[in-house]
Image: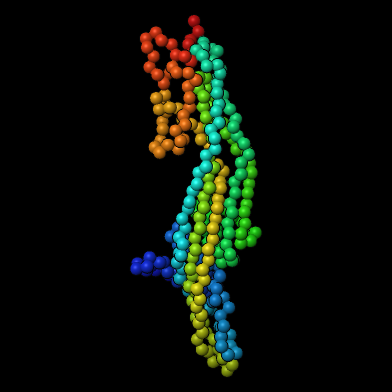
Amino acid sequence: MNDWTHDARSGMKLIALVLGVSGASHALSADDPPAPNDRACCTSPTCSGQGFPASGIQYAYEARWLIEPTITTTLTPEPWIPCTSTPCALLPCSQVPPPGFCDAGKEVKQSTCWSGSTKATIPLSLFLANLVDASIEVEAGYSHCHEETQRLPGNILQQHCWKHFGRFVKVEKRVHASVEYTHRCTYTCYNAAGNPYPGSAECVQVVSSSVVHKPWPDWQIAPLPGECGGQIPDPDPFDGKRAEPCCPSVIPCVALAPGEQPCCGCYVDQ
């Protein structure tokens, strides 16, 4: 059974775990240091004299963040890619080309790198990878990078009277953390005469890990200008970029005077 208590003075979560044949598990939240995958100095407890510890070691540990996980997300937009439809003219509706798409797709990479100094960092590395929505291959060692390449679509609307824009936005998520574990165990030793006596061990272990995740980039399409019916969120993720009418008097961007015709659009054939 896991015994969880909280020290309100220090803000540190204390985890006391008594191990029998196997340890119980606990679903971690973002506030919990991950459980260690070894018992440090309790793994091979020693007894003075000619004895050895009995089976059934009583084990507990305390864990606290030295550096709590903080995710840093960096967005790097690539240049806007235009998609223009021609001609820019007022046409009979029967002659207006149907909407289509410009293909701006390309091969892109997704990568995840993680690093830690010892086997004890593996639970922490897995924990941090989950925080940034990544997966890692711990079998490859204590530091490893995994990279995938595939072609991602990048479709930009091709529309009469309009110039539309699309772009990829690269994403990078970094997270680093350190945990200090205080391991404690008590056990029974036996001397050469076979008489029992108590044994104990305590040690402090610090583990650190870092994960850098670069997922598939986001794809953005610049919206219509507000005066043309576009919906612009605040803050604006498009850095002020808008689709552009091909000439000044495209409906619905402007109010036309009586009898005035738009510079681009279509009319019903007579």
The mark tally for this picture is: 0
How is the rendered protein coloured?
rainbow
On the image, the x and y values in percent for residue 133 come to 52, 50
Residue 90 appears in view = yes
On the image, the x and y values in percent for residue 180 come to 48, 68
* Residue drawn 39% across the image and 37% down it: 234
* Residue drawn 50% across the image and 32% down it: 221
Residue 17 appears in view = no
> In the rendered image of this protein, does residue 136 appear above or below residue 2?
above
Quarter-wise, where is residue 193 in the image?
bottom right
Farthest residue to the top: give it. Answer: 270
* Residue drawn 48% across the image and 73% down it: 182
> In the rendered image of this protein, does residue 72 appear above or below residue 265?
below
> In the rendered image of this protein, does residue 206 appear above or below residue 235?
below
- In this picture, residue 264 sits left or right of residue 118: left
Q: Nearer the viewer, residue 22 or 259?
A: 259
Quarter-wise, where is residue 192 in the image?
bottom right
Q: Nearer the viewer, residue 170 or 11?
A: 170
Farthest residue to the left: give it. Answer: 9
